[in-house]
Amino acid sequence: MAQAAFEEVVDDFEFLEDWEDRYRMVIEMGKDMAPMPEALKAPATKVDGCASQVWLHIAPENGVFRFQGDSDAMIVKGLIALLHRLYDGLPLAEVAAVDARSELGRLGLNDHLSAQRSNGLRAMIERIRETAAA
């Protein structure tokens, strides 16, 4: 089961029949994210495997998973916002148990993202899981 913040997105998506509206919602979620400080946009936080530039700064606090992210592409920034709702605030031990592909599939994203975007999303999820496990 996903966090409450992600469940809200799932509920909102159910009311949006048009994929353009869903894309707009994802983009708006990205715009609403707190900005990531420029100093954190460094080679160490850059995610390889994404068509656009993506940075994830993962900084667990007291056993709780925390991260910030940013991208130069609006839709990707929205995908980061979705991942933030899915993972941020979880106990570190629970991060690996999240089936992100299945959870995001509930939104229908698997069928509506380009191959490049899907690969980038997988790379972001992999970075989150690997870092939380370390």
Image (cartoon, rainbow, N blue to C red):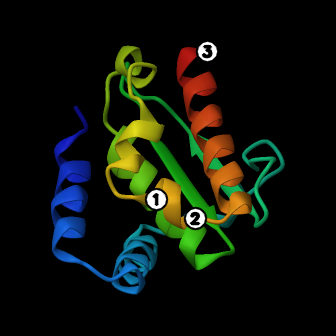
Q: Which residue sits at x=44%, y=37%?
A: 100
Nearer to me, 55 or 79:
79
Of pointers 1 and 3, the one earlier in the residue sequence: 1
In this view of the protein, which residue sits in the foreground, 77 or 34?
A: 77
Of badges 2 and 3, the one in the foreground is 2
Query: What amino acid type is highlighted by mark number 2?
Result: Leu
Q: Check disc 1 and report the residue beneath it.
A: 109
Amino acid carrying label 1: it is Leu
Q: Could you say where residue 56 lies in the image, as x and y percent from the top left?
A: 62, 48
The residue identified by callout 3 is 134
Marks 2 & 1, CB-CB < 8 Å contact: yes
Q: Earlier in the sequence, mark 2 or mark 3?
A: 2
Q: Quadrant of the N terminus?
A: top left
Q: Which residue is mark 2?
A: 113
CA distance separating discs 1 and 3:
28 Å
Q: CA distance from mark 2 to mark 1?
A: 6 Å
Q: Is residue 102 left or right of residue 7?
A: right
